[in-house]
Amino acid sequence: PYNPNARRMAELIQEDFSKIGVEVEIVSYEWGEYLDRSKELDRDGAVLLGWTGDNGDPDNFLAVLLGCDGVGGSNRAQWCHQPFDDVIQTAKVTSDPAERTALYEEAQVIFKDQAPWATIAHSVVFMPMRPEVEGYVMHPLGGHIFTEVGLAE
């Protein structure tokens, strides 16, 4: 999981802010209510959430989490920056791989400059297996494909 202990992460953030004189109140909710409240446009405060891309396309991350269409939904930062949105909307419909890559790189520069949210952690996934297991390849998106898996004799 990307964040196995959100409460502890919130406490560490609270501690860091206290070092610079900023008081932070940690408020927790049941998961469903938390997700609903995190979408509210008039909410007060920040949220801690994670994301696992499920198709390998940069649009699945940049547009879904940061695009103007996602405000009030999956864009929990509630950030709508038109220059960024113009770039990702163009990239979404661009078929030339080099041009599309350049556009998404441009979008990432805008994201870095604007900093609508901070990336705190990136999970590391481990896949333990027995030595006699053959043919298993870890899928970059987290899925498991067993068609080529077998056991050595």
Image: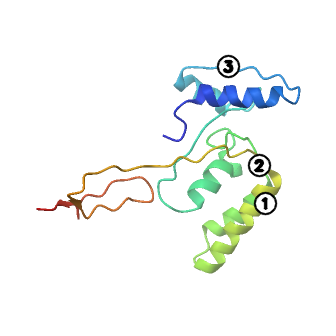
Q: Residue furthest left?
A: 153
Q: Which mark is residue 80?
A: 2
Counting residues from the start of the chain, the first of labels 1 and 2 encountered is: 2
Residue tagged by mark 1?
110
Q: In the rendered view, would you say 70 is above or below 25?
A: below
Task: Judge by depth and name the residue closer to the eye, 86 or 101.
Answer: 101
Separation of residues labelled 1 and 3 (CA atoms): 31 Å
Counting residues from the start of the chain, the first of labels 3 and 2 encountered is: 3
Q: Residue 5 at what x, y percent from top left?
A: 55, 30
Residue depth check, mark 3 versus mark 2: number of the one nearer the observer:
3
Task: Judge by depth and name the residue closer to the eye, 83 or 120.
Answer: 120
Q: Quadrant of residue 150 in the image? A: bottom left
The answer to whether mark 1 and mark 3 are in CB contact below 8 A is no
Q: Quadrant of residue 120 in the image? A: top right
Residue depth check, mark 1 versus mark 2: number of the one nearer the observer:
1
Q: In the rendered view, would you say 149 is above or below 10?
A: below
Residue tagged by mark 3?
27
Say what amino acid the circle numbered 1 marks: Ile
Mark 1: few/some/many CA within 10 Å (<14, 14-19, 20+) = some
Q: Residue at x 29, y 51 (%)?
A: 129
Mark 3: few/some/many CA within 10 Å (<14, 14-19, 20+) = few
Q: Quadrant of residue 7 in the image? A: top right
Mark 2: which secondary structure? loop
Q: Residue 79 at what x, y percent from top left?
A: 76, 45
Mark 3: which secondary structure? loop
